[in-house]
Image (cartoon, rainbow, N blue to C red):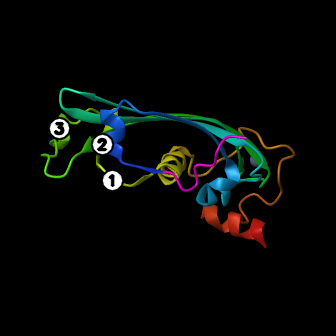
Amino acid sequence: MSESIAGTVLDSLEFARSGGVLERIVRLDELPRLADLLITTDGFLSLRLTGWRDNDKSWLQLDVAGELVLCCQRCLDGVRFPLEIRSRLRLMAPGEEWPDDDLVDDSADAVEAEKELAVLSLMEDEVLLALPIAPMHEKCDPPSADAGKHGPSPFASLAALKK
Ligand SMILES: [Zn+2]
């Protein structure tokens, strides 16, 4: 078993400066906000966090891969969702001038460089952003006669599922 990263915090600028690499296998039940949206928390995501500097800029790259089983909003059955995330973060040191929106590369977000970056929480944020708002099968099987009874909110059916 790999060491849990539940409590792992790192100095993000130092991580970038030293060319840090962090690789972990994360159990789905270690991600409570995500787990709420899943049919099953049996499974893993692989996480790779790398840091580097170029031209006095500090960067992090977060790669997450795996497969989730989300709740179909039409039939409430499980729907598989392959996950493959790569996000780049430009670390802004205290006092560093933030780039104009126009100048920020679309492929990277500028974020405040944290001294105690909670890796698991960052990973969970990125995974949640990557999920579809209303996951659905292309074609539900069997077709549910209840479709439409759960109201317009995708969360209404999630709530119903938990009862
Ligand atoms: Zn379905």
Was residue 127 drawn as part of the magenta stretch in this picture?
Answer: no
- The disc, 2 or 1, on the residue closer to the chain's N-terminal end is 2
Q: Which span of residues is magenta-colored?
A: 1-8
Q: In the image, what residue type sits under mark 1?
A: Lys
Image coordinates of residue 129 in percent, x first then y, are 49, 48
Q: Secondary structure at mark 1?
A: loop
Task: Please tell me which residue lies in front, 71 or 115.
Answer: 115
Which residue shows up at 74% across the image and 52% down it?
A: 41
Mark number, residue 163: none
Image coordinates of residue 144 in percent, x first then y, are 82, 53
Residue position for label 1: 115
Q: Is mark 1 within 8 Å of ligand 1?
A: no
For the stretch drawn in magenta, the main secondary structure is loop
Mark number, residue 102: 3
Residue extending farthest top:
54
- The disc, 3 or 2, on the residue closer to the chain's N-terminal end is 2
Residue position for label 2: 13
Q: In the image, what residue type sits under mark 2?
A: Leu
The residue carrying pointer 1 sits among few (fewer than 14), some (14 to 19) or many (20 or more) residues within 10 Å by Cα, namely some
Which residue shows up at 37% across the image and 29% down it?
A: 19
Q: Secondary structure at mark 3?
A: helix
Left-right relation of 57 to 75: left
Cα distance, mark 2 to mark 1?
7 Å
Residue contact between numbered discs 1 and 3, judged by CB atoms under 8 Å: no
Q: Where is the N terminus found, in terms of image quarters? A: top right
Image coordinates of residue 92 in percent, x first then y, are 23, 45
Q: In the image, what residue type sits under mark 3?
A: Asp
Residue contact between numbered discs 2 and 1, judged by CB atoms under 8 Å: yes
Task: Please tell me which residue lies in front, 152 or 67.
Answer: 67
- The disc, 1 or 3, on the residue closer to the chain's N-terminal end is 3
Left-right relation of 79 to 57: right
Residue extending farthest right:
142
